Image (tube, helix red, strand yellow):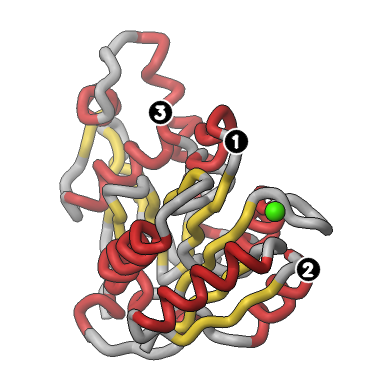
């Protein structure tokens, strides 16, 4: 049974959601302050968070940013402001979905189920969620979530720019294949020209730094001198 956390300061909205989600068989906890929610998230396994954007202490956006420093738990935003949706779904904030108020609680329940279904392989690979159920998933060094444009490395969510995402995705999807800089550019949908050539090197450098922050000794992205780059999966 999945455990869902609702962070919402309006009791009538929270009550409706609680009622519907509990009716669907979920275990539900309700907090009115982002601060209390973050505290709970640090100590309790939560499978999904439904977060209001307009909270009394800090905004839902800010709460999500803080949350992403220690957890990959899926977040659905409840927002009354349509013009901020781009920000909500923005990669930098790390939200998974949003619902605009007023909403139908059934619709929210449907989205909750859809996300939980989608993130199961990711949750298995993530050490944060604890349980390892599928050996093949758990062993995967990289886990690419196409829909959310996210890549997990050793179970940890990488904070990637769009370019870095495409680059890393291209490499990890064909392990041990050596890509030239031009091939990488083409795979990334860019046109190959002289100016971009070196920018691949820069992106690789940033990517490696991000990977090293998770596993200092591993070198999954390797250089093939005079040709380009490849993803060398870890041997075990
Ligand atoms: Ca509110």
Furthest residue in direction right, as rendered: 57
Residue labelled with disc 3 = 200
Mark 2 → mark 1, Cα distance in angstroms:
22 Å
Q: Is residue 98 above or below residue 193?
A: below
Q: Nearer the viewer, mark 2 or mark 1?
A: 1
Q: Is residue 226 above or below residue 159?
A: above
Q: Is residue 163 left or right of residue 33?
A: left
Q: Nearer the viewer, mark 2 or mark 3?
A: 2
Quick one: label 2 or label 3, which is nearer the N terminus?
Answer: 2
Screen quadrant of the C terminus: bottom left
Which residue is painted at 30% across and 56% down in the image? 144
**Where does residue 42 sit, x and y in percent of width and height?**
67, 79
Q: Is residue 158 left or right of residue 140?
A: right
Screen quadrant of the N terminus: bottom left
Q: Is residue 142 visible?
A: no
Q: Secondary structure at mark 2?
A: helix
Which residue is painted at 51% across and 32% down in the image? 86
**Where does residue 124 sit, x and y in percent of width and height?**
34, 79
Q: Secondary structure at mark 1?
A: loop
Which residue is painted at 78% across and 68% down in the image? 35
* Residues at discs 2 and 3 in contact (Cβ within 8 Å): no
Q: Is residue 166 above or below residue 51?
A: above
Residue labelled with disc 1 = 81
- Tell whether circle 1 marks a residue whose Cβ is less than 8 angstroms from ligand 1: no
Q: Nearer the viewer, mark 1 or mark 3?
A: 1
Q: Residues within 10 Å of mark 3 (few under 14, many from 20)?
A: many
Query: Which one is nearer the viewer's eye here, 175 or 34?
Result: 34
Mark 1 → mark 3, Cα distance in angstroms:
38 Å
Q: Residues within 10 Å of mark 2 (few under 14, many from 20)?
A: some
Residue labelled with disc 2 = 35
């Amino acid at each position: 049974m999945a455990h869902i956390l609702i962070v919402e300061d309006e009791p009538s909205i929270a009550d409706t959601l609680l009622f519907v989600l509990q009716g669907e068989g979920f275990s539900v906890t309700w907090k009115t302050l982002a601060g209390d929610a973050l505290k709970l998230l640090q100590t309790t396994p939560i499978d999904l968070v439904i977060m209001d954007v307009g909270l009394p202490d800090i905004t839902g956006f800010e709460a999500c940013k803080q949350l992403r420093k220690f957890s990959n738990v899926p977040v659905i935003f409840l927002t009354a402001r349509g013009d901020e949706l781009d920000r909500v779904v923005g990669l930098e904030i790390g939200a998974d979905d949003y619902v605009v108020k007023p909403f139908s609680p059934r619709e929210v329940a449907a989205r909750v189920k859809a996300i939980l279904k989608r993130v199961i392989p990711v949750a298995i690979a993530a050490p944060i969620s604890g349980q390892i159920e599928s050996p093949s998933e758990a062993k995967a060094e990289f886990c690419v979530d196409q829909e959310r444009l996210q890549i997990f490395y050793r179970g940890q969510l990488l904070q990637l720019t769009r370019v870095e995402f495409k680059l890393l995705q291209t490499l990890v999807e064909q392990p041990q294949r050596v890509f030239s800089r031009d091939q990488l550019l083409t795979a990334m949908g860019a046109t190959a020209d002289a100016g971009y050539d070196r920018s691949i090197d820069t992106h690789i450098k940033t990517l490696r730094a991000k990977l090293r922050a998770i596993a200092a000794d591993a070198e999954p992205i390797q250089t093939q001198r005079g040709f380009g780059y490849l993803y060398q999966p870890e041997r075990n």
